[in-house]
Amino acid sequence: MAPMVEPFFRDLGDSAFKHRLGGSPAAGVYRFRPSGPEQRDSMTTRAVADRVQEIYGENLVADAGVVQVSSGWEDADSDLHGIRIGPSAPRSSTDEFVLGLARARADVVVTTGKILRQEPDLQYRLSEAADLNLAAWRHDQLRRRTPAEILILTSGQDLDWDHPIFGGVSSVSLFMGTDAAASEMVASRPPGVRVIPDSAPSLQSLLQFLRARTDVGTISLEVGPSTAGSLYRRPGWIQEWMLSVYLAVSLPKAVMSGLWPNAAARAAAGLSLKSEHIQEEESGTWAFQRFQALG
């Protein structure tokens, strides 16, 4: 279905369609008003577009390169602590939308075996909620007809083949070493799960592999700070960072994960603040920031 950005006109010349059309029968030109599922998808696509514009001031439909998406809390020393996913984590419906948006923009979502072990219920299916249908927005605005691929950086150890990620709608690949032990650990993988061997697997070599593909314009990174940290040591690896910051005075230590790059490290990586949206959520005040690579 084409995105309903501009009005669509059809020359029907039949007054029997008046219940779906508006305009001038004399001129034979009517404004088409979609109904049923088509109308709902059009409305929710516009709702997503409006929400994206509200948060980031742009439509975010262009290819963006490597995009990190994460949430954090900044302490009094300006250290940015990651927020561990779980029942005690501060809740934010906007942060959940931002995560879904990053996935909706992506050709490939990159994660790790460690994250799969930490989040046994993790799924990548896009929201099809009646009010904010990210799946419809991806289809209509980005012209991406299939779900994003999932690429897992892993040693192959302790992967649970019953994890929902291996039974979802996305194709899944494992980026891992070439040694015999690693191959043996994934020998029982589900059908369709592909292995991409690398002699020295790392996040950098994974990204180099993806950058060589002509069908990949946007890569969403869903990796922890310890894995992503090396990408911020010099400019060029990260083109965009979608960061949700919890602005509370304190955060329980049990909810903290590792440290994300602070302001100085972001500057060293060539990232500058592009936009910031402050919003009150059920858990308190949040800042939704977007950093982009300079130049």
Image (cartoon, helix red, strand yellow):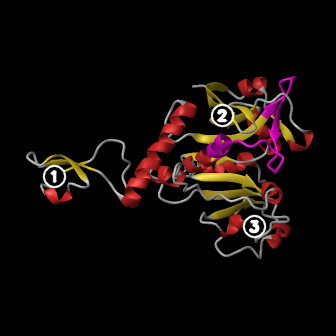
- Residue lying at 80% horizontally and 33% vertically, measured from the top left: 73
Q: Residue 87, how many percent across, how many down?
A: 82, 51
Image quarter hosting the C terminus: top right
Residue 126 locus on image (x, y percent):
59, 55
- Which three-letter amino acid code belongs to the residue tagged 1? Asp
Question: Which numbered disc, 2 or 1, marks the residue that appears first in the sequence?
Answer: 1
Of tags 3 and 1, the one toward the viewer is 1
Q: Which residues are magenta?
A: 73-99
Left or right side of 9 for 96: right
Q: Are marks 3 and 1 in contact (CB under 8 Å)?
A: no
Above-or-below relation of 121 to 27: below
Residue 142 in sight in this render: no
Residue at the image point whose x is 27% and y is 47% from the top: 8
How many residues crowd around disc 2 within 10 Å: few (fewer than 14), some, or many (20 or more)?
A: some
Indicate which disc, 3 or 1, sits on the residue closer to the N terminus: 1
Which is more foreground, mark 3 or mark 2? 3
Could you tell me the amino acid type at mark 2?
Gly
Q: Which mark is residue 11?
A: 1
- The residue lying toward the viewer, choosing from 190 and 231, is 190
Q: Which mark is residue 47?
A: none
Which type of secondary structure does the marked residue at label 2 adopt? loop
- Quarter of the image for the N terminus: give it: bottom left
Select label 2 or label 1 by which is in front: 1
Q: Amino acid at mark 3?
A: His
Residue 163 numbered tag: 3
Q: Residue furthest left?
A: 26
Q: Earlier in the sequence, mark 3 or mark 2?
A: 3
Residue holding disc 2: 236
Seen in the picture, residue 274 relative to 228 is either above or below; the reply is above
Side (left or right) of 72 relative to 24 = right
